[in-house]
Structures are given as C-alpha cells and as structure tokens.
Image (tube, rainbow, N blue to C red):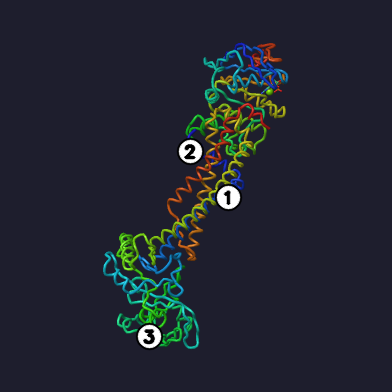
C-alpha cells in the first residue's frame, strides 16, 4: 500500500465521524496544551526570579553578623544579636581581597517616620554612596548624599517613591527640601530613588537611605554594621572572594580554624540556584500532572479505536478478501490513532502557546515556549497514538477474513 | 486451471470434530461458468472460501494456475486473492461512505497501482458490469440493490482475476434485478471470464453452463447444463 493511499484512507476514516474524532482528540489537546503552558510558565517564573535577585545587585556577597539566618529576611529587625561587624572589617575586606569591585557597609532598622502629620513605618538604611552601584539603584530627582556628608553625620535622607507617596501623597512634587522626622530626629529630603518595582525579597521603593554614620550615631548607638555587601568583579571570582573573606574575618575576629563563625556570608548565586531549583521541581511536578492527563487521553483514543475496529469488522473482512495483508490493516488503524493524537498534539501546542502568550501579555509571568517543548509535545503525542493504537490495530489485523465477513 | 483433489475440511467445536467437506474432487477450466448447488449447510460457502484462498483445506490439494494454494501462509493467501480472485458477496460489502469509483478501485490500492491508472481501470470495469456512468461519483449507499451488486461485480473484475467467485449474489435481490445481475455474469463469461456461482436455487444455477451438486460435503453430480449450451 502506498503512503499517499494510506493517508487518504486514514483521513477519510477520521473525518467520517467528526464529532467522535474531535471528542477523542480533546484529551490529547488538553494534555499537550497544559504541558506546553506549564513548562513555559515555569521557565518564565524561573527567569523572573533569577532576574529579580540579580536586580538587587549583580554578583553580590552579603556578610551579616551573628547566627545563621534563613535567606530572604534581608530586612533585619535592628542589629543582629552578635554585633560583630565593624567598619574596620569592611575596610580590611576592600583592602586585602582581590576580585572585589565595591564594598558597601550598611545598617538597617525599622522606625516610625513622620512628615506633615503623616505617619509610616519603614526600613531606614544607613549607607555610603557606593550603595547605589552595588544595588543597581539610581536617583530620579534631587541627588544622593556625598561621601563628605557621610563623614559629617549629615541629617539628610533619600527616600523611595513608595515612602514619598505614603508621606506626601501620590506622585507629590517638590518633596526635595522638605523635612521628615525619623524616630523624632528631623532629616532633610535631598533625593528620591527611581522606581524599581517589588522584588519579592524586599522592596527598595519603600526604603529610606541616610548616611551610615548618622544612622550609627542616632539610631544604632554604636559603630557596628548590619551587613557588608561585597560586589565581586564577575561571577567567576565569587567563590574565591567568599573563601578569602571568610578566612580574613575569622582571623580578624580571632576565631580558631574550625570554630563557629560569628558572621555569615550569603552568596547570591547560591540563592539564585536554590530558588530556581525550587521552581524547577515545581514545574516538573506540574508537568507530570499534565502528563497524566495525556495518559488519560491515550486511553480515550484506545477506547475509540476498539469501538471503531468492532464497528468496521465487515470492512476489515472485505479488505482482507480483496488482498489486504495483515500489515496493511495494522498500518491503517495505527495510522488512524496516530493521526488523531498528532492533530490533537498540534491543536494542543497552539493552545498551550496561546495560554503562554496571554499570561505574558497580561504581565503575569513572561512565559516562554521553547522549541524543545514543542518538538517533545509532537513526539509524545505521536508516541501516545502508537502505544494506545497498537492493541486495537493488532486486533483488527488478526481477524480471520471469513469470520469478519460473516460479522453482523 | 483449478484442480481440486480429495479436499476435506473439518471444524472442531466443543471438542467435537465435524467434517464439512468430505473429499471433494473436480477441475474447472478457464472460461467456464460453473454453478455449485446444494441445500443449506451442505458446505457450499466452505468450499468457496477454499477456492477463493480465504481458507485452506484440512487435507487434499487445491492447485490454482499451477500453484498449490492449500499450504500457503496468510500473507501468501492474501497475495493470491489480490492477484487471481474476484469476490461477489450476497451482502455486497461496499464501503458505505466511499464513492462508487473508490469502492471499485479499492483492490488496486493493495496492488499499489497509482491513482489515475486505478480510476481508469475502475471505470472500464464499471462499464463492463453495466453501471451507468452518471453513477460513478455517487456514494455507494445512495444506490439501489441491483446497482450495488453491479458495483460489487465491477470491484471483482477490476484486478483482472483468474476466477470470479459469487456466493448467493442474487440472494438479496428481487427476481427481476437478480435476472439482470445473472445476465451480467453471462456476458462476462462470454467475454472469456471464469465464473463460479454458488446458490441453492435451481433457477439461478440454470444460468451456468455446468452445475455441480453437493450435499453433506460430497459431490452428488457434476453435469453440463445443455440448456445453456444450446442457448449460446
Ligand atoms: N467456523 C465454523 N466452525 C464450525 N462449523 C462451521 C464453521 N463454518 C461452517 N461450519 C459448518 O459447516 C457446515 C457448512 O456450512 P456452509 O456455510 O459451507 O454451508 P452452505 O452450504 O454455504 O449453507 P447456506 O446455503 O445456508 O449458506 C454447516 O453445518 C456449518 O455449521
Ligand atoms: Mg453459504
């Protein structure tokens, strides 16, 4: 039998009962569409989590004092219990370790802020100007404070756009030059940072930045640091910088080798890989659930093919009587099953792509359908057709022509 | 052309063996028109299945065109049917949703003939079987019983078979239409085709040139139908 004839026979058989073929295909359509969409959304989520972490600053090592904390709580409530990090530590790291671009010493705390009778409670970070490049932050209006203002304990503040909205009203103008009080201490607003958007871990738009020294004098009460952010020159040297910084701090804090450190270094790439492996596992789980619906769809195909074979017993008998070999009959019914799943797969790929497109269009997640998942979907759907069409086709091929012709 | 010697066929049902054909021997030459007659249950269809290479005998030999068909496997039997046999069934057995032309051309699909050539042959066969050209593109379930049987005859003709086997071809038709179908067989025979007709009706058998009577799996008589010879 020629391939073109096989295709023609198959197509006419499948289109003969459109409703039934359509309903049978639906299982495969739903299965493939959900696999495609879920994998695309999963990949999109993974990308955006990685991008969000990178947005907090690229190639970052975060050194914090005291006992180990779970990552994610970068906004500490006041100082850590063991107040072990000092400006000296930060300077020593900058001076002695190679592969470092910037070192940013920081303190943080949550305080009550008042301006013009409005109240808010938010994070106040004591930083140096180097904070800007390290954390990818920029100023929209006004300016950031200079190193000289840090040295002079200046009572100036740069506020995030959310803080501005809370204290002065939505998109209020002429905020630069106004006075706010932080925990009763008056500060002059000299700048507003550019909107970055929430990042899930902390929202830089809702922060207030003041000179490090000012924060230490008025709010912390000592010279200790909350965190030291170290930006490595590139991703490759991060491990080396981390090892060197650990060794240096152990030595400075006079902790014997093998002793428990009174600080902890968080490597950003660790966070990225942990976060993406979590979303990766989630994606795989969802895809597996979608895969189960493919199996259910396949069983639907098998059910319909068995019905078809029984209904067309006489036809099978006739085809054999006029010279069809068993393999011709086998090929015909297998082709019908594969055609159904293949069509179903094609519609499913389109539907999955459409779902991913809509999800991306409404900015929920930037879902990306990969060529690989499309190719996989097609081969899986054809495979489902072969697996679940095999038994019905074999049943048809093995019929005795005499009995098949006699079938009522 | 056909050489049957001592053909037997037995079925075992429920542990009990019943012999349906009990040693049938005869030969049929090319160009003959033979009717096989007998009462219901005498083994006519069983014999036709063996002659048509749908089944093999339990013992005995069946030589078709010099080839022993009695020992072939399923695929070899399918090839014999494809090349040498044309079947006409009582129940027509047309594909209901296919056109007349596609039904007739179907045997050639398995002979791997290209489509244009197939359709040309199918049209010639349909004209031979006496179907009007205006019906060629109708769906087969839009035809009358007589027309359906002509389509079935055309399908049996299309692969230029050595023999045409017809099992009760008029069984589902009224007397008048049956007569027309039988006339078609006679015309095909006068063009040199070998035809074996199976029936239990004497009127039908009388259209053949030779009548073989079987009963209980044995040949009762095998005689020339002088009436038809004289008519010709
Ligand atoms: N597959 C089978 N298994 C068992 N017995 C069978 C089988 N096929 C046929 N028979 C028996 O063989 C005998 C002959 O059957 P066959 O169909 O050849 O008769 P027939 O002469 O064609 O009858 P009719 O004129 O009614 O069609 C019957 O008694 C039938 O029961
Ligand atoms: Mg019979």
Q: Vertically, is A116 above or below A25?
A: below
Q: How many marks?
A: 3
Determine contact: label 2, label 3, CB under 8 Å.
Answer: no
**Callout 2: residue from which chain?**
A
Of marks 2 and 1, which one's residue comes earlier in the chain?
2
Q: Which mark is residue A4?
A: 2
Compared to residue A240, the image places residue B211 above or below, namely above
SS at circle 1 = helix
| Residue A105, image quadrant | bottom left
Residue A305, x across and y down, in percent: 59, 40
- Distance, label 2 to label 1, CA atoms, is 26 Å
Mark 1 CB within 8 Å of ligand 1: no
Vertical comparison of A215 with B103: above or below: below
- The reply to whether label 3 and label 1 mark residues of one chain is yes
Q: Nearer the viewer, residue B142 or A76?
A: A76
Tag 3 residue? A155
At x 55%, y 27%, the residue is A323
Q: Are marks 2 and 1 in contact (CB under 8 Å)?
A: no
Spatial CA distance of label 2 from label 3 is 84 Å
- For the residues labelled 3 and 1, the Cα–Cα distance comes to 67 Å
Residue A144, quarter of picture: bottom left
């Amino acid at each position: 039998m020629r391939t073109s004839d096989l295709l023609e026979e198959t197509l006419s058989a499948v289109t003969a009962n459109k409703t039934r073929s359509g309903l049978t295909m639906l299982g495969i359509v739903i299965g493939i569409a959900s696999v495609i969409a879920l994998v695309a959304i999963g990949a999109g989520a993974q990308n955006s989590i990685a991008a969000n972490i990178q947005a907090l600053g690229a190639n970052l090592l975060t050194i914090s004092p005291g006992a180990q904390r779970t990552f994610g709580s970068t906004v500490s409530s006041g100082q850590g219990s063991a107040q072990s990090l000092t400006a000296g530590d930060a300077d020593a790291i900058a001076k002695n370790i190679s592969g470092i671009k910037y070192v940013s010493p920081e303190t943080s705390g949550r305080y009550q802020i008042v301006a013009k009778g409005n109240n808010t409670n938010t994070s106040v970070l004591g930083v140096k100007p180097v904070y800007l490049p390290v954390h990818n932050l920029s100023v929209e209006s006004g300016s950031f404070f200079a190193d000289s203002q840090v040295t002079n304990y200046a009572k100036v503040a740069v506020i995030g756009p959310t803080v501005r909205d809370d204290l002065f009203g939505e998109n209020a103008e002429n905020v630069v030059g106004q006075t706010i009080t932080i925990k009763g201490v008056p500060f002059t607003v000299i700048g507003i940072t550019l909107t970055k958007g929430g990042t899930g871990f902390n929202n830089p738009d809702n922060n207030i930045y003041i000179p490090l020294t000012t924060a230490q004098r008025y709010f912390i009460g000592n010279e200790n640091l909350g965190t030291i952010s170290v930006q490595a020159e590139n991703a490759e040297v991060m491990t080396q910088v981390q090892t060197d910084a650990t060794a240096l701090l152990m030595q400075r804090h006079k902790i014997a080798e093998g002793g428990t450190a009174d600080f902890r270094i968080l490597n950003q790439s660790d966070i990225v890989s942990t976060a993406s492996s979590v979303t990766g596992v989630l994606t795989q789980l969802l895809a597996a659930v979608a895969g189960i619906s493919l199996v259910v769809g396949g069983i639907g195909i098998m059910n319909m093919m068995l019905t078809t074979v029984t209904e067309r017993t006489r036809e099978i008998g006739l085809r054999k009587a006029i010279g069809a070999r068993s393999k011709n009959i086998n090929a015909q019914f297998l082709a019908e099953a594969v055609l159904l799943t293949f069509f179903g797969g094609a519609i499913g790929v389109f539907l999955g792509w459409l779902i991913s497109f809509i999800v991306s269009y409404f900015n929920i997640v930037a879902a990306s359908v990969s060529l690989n998942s499309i190719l996989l979907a097609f081969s899986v759907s054809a495979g489902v057709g072969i697996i679940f069409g095999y038994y019905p086709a074999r049943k048809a091929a093995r019929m005795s022509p005499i009995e098949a012709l006699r079938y009522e | 052309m056909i050489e049957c010697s001592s053909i037997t066929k037995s079925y075992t049902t429920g542990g009990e063996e019943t012999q349906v054909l009990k040693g049938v021997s005869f030969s049929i030459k090319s160009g003959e028109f033979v009717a096989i007659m007998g009462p219901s249950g005498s083994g006519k269809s069983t014999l036709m299945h063996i002659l048509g290479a749908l089944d093999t005998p339990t013992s005995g030999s069946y030589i078709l065109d010099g080839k022993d068909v009695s020992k072939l496997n399923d695929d070899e039997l399918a090839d014999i049917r494809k090349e040498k046999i044309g079947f006409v069934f009582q129940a027509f057995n047309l594909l209901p949703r296919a056109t007349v032309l596609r039904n007739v051309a179907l045997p050639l699909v398995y002979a791997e003939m290209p489509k244009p050539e197939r359709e040309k042959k199918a049209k010639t066969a349909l004209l031979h079987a006496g179907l009007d050209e205006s019906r060629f593109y109708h769906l087969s379930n839009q035809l009358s019983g007589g027309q359906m049987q002509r389509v079935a005859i055309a399908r049996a003709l299309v692969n230029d078979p050595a023999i045409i086997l017809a099992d009760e071809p008029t069984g589902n038709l009224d007397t008048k239409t049956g007569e027309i179908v039988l006339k078609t067989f006679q015309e095909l025979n006068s063009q040199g085709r070998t035809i074996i007709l199976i029936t239990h009706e004497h009127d039908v058998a009388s259209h053949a040139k030779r009548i073989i009577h079987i009963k209980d799996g044995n040949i009762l008589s095998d005689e020339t139908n002088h009436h038809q010879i004289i008519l010709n």
